[in-house]
Image (cartoon, rainbow, N blue to C red):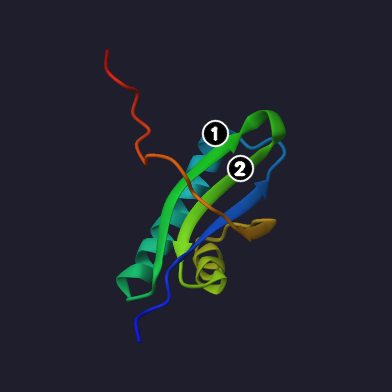
Amino acid sequence: MGEQPLSTLLVEHYWPGVTAEEFGDAAERVRTSAEQLAARGERIRYLHSTLVPEDEAAFCVFEAASESLVEEAYRRAGVRFERMVAAVETGSGSHEPEKT
């Protein structure tokens, strides 16, 4: 039997007044925490994060074997979040603008 496929998980944050720098620092701590868990053999990978200042909301996306691994990454990073839900990622995976 093979390993279960990783789930894509979207973590939602609602942070009134958060700055891009503050969110960037928090996202970096969570990314580092996820990398440390992965280095121990855990199946978790931080994909990306997005801040929506107008809505005072931020989102981080992971691939992980379980929600509990993402929760552990957040706990170790000392970052709070409001909700975690399963998500579906689509697109080419490239975010670089086309050259003309």
Amino acid under disc 1: Ala
Determine the residue located farthest toward the left in the rendered image. 99
Determine the residue located farthest toward the top in the rendered image. 100
Q: Quadrant of residue 44?
A: bottom left
Secondary structure beneath dot 2 equals strand
Task: Nearest to the eye among marks 2 and 1: give it.
Answer: 2
Q: On screen, 41 above or below 1?
A: above
Query: Foreground residue, 11 or 79?
Result: 11
Question: On the image, numbered disc 2 is attached to which residue?
Answer: 58
Question: On the image, numbered disc 1 is attached to which residue?
Answer: 20
Please provide percent x and percent y for residue 79. Answer: 58, 57
Name the residue rendered at 33%, 75% in the picture.
40
Please provide percent x and percent y for residue 14. Answer: 70, 45
The numbered mark, 2 or 1, whose residue comes first in the sequence reads 1
- For residue 52, side relative to residue 34 (left or right): right
Distance from disc 2 to disc 1, alpha carbons, whole Å, reads 10 Å
Name the residue rendered at 63%, 59% in the picture.
85
Determine the residue located farthest toward the bottom in the rendered image. 1
- For residue 8, side relative to residue 40 (left or right): right
Instruction: Give the crowd class for mark 1: few <14, some 14-19, many >=20 residues within 10 Å.
Output: some
Determine the residue located farthest toward the front in the rendered image. 1
Amino acid under disc 2: Ala
Q: Quadrant of residue 45?
A: bottom left
Please provide percent x and percent y for residue 98. Answer: 31, 21
Secondary structure beneath dot 1 equals helix
Name the residue rendered at 65%, 56% in the picture.
81
Instruction: Give the crowd class for mark 2: few <14, some 14-19, many >=20 residues within 10 Å.
Output: many
Please provide percent x and percent y for residue 4. Answer: 42, 76
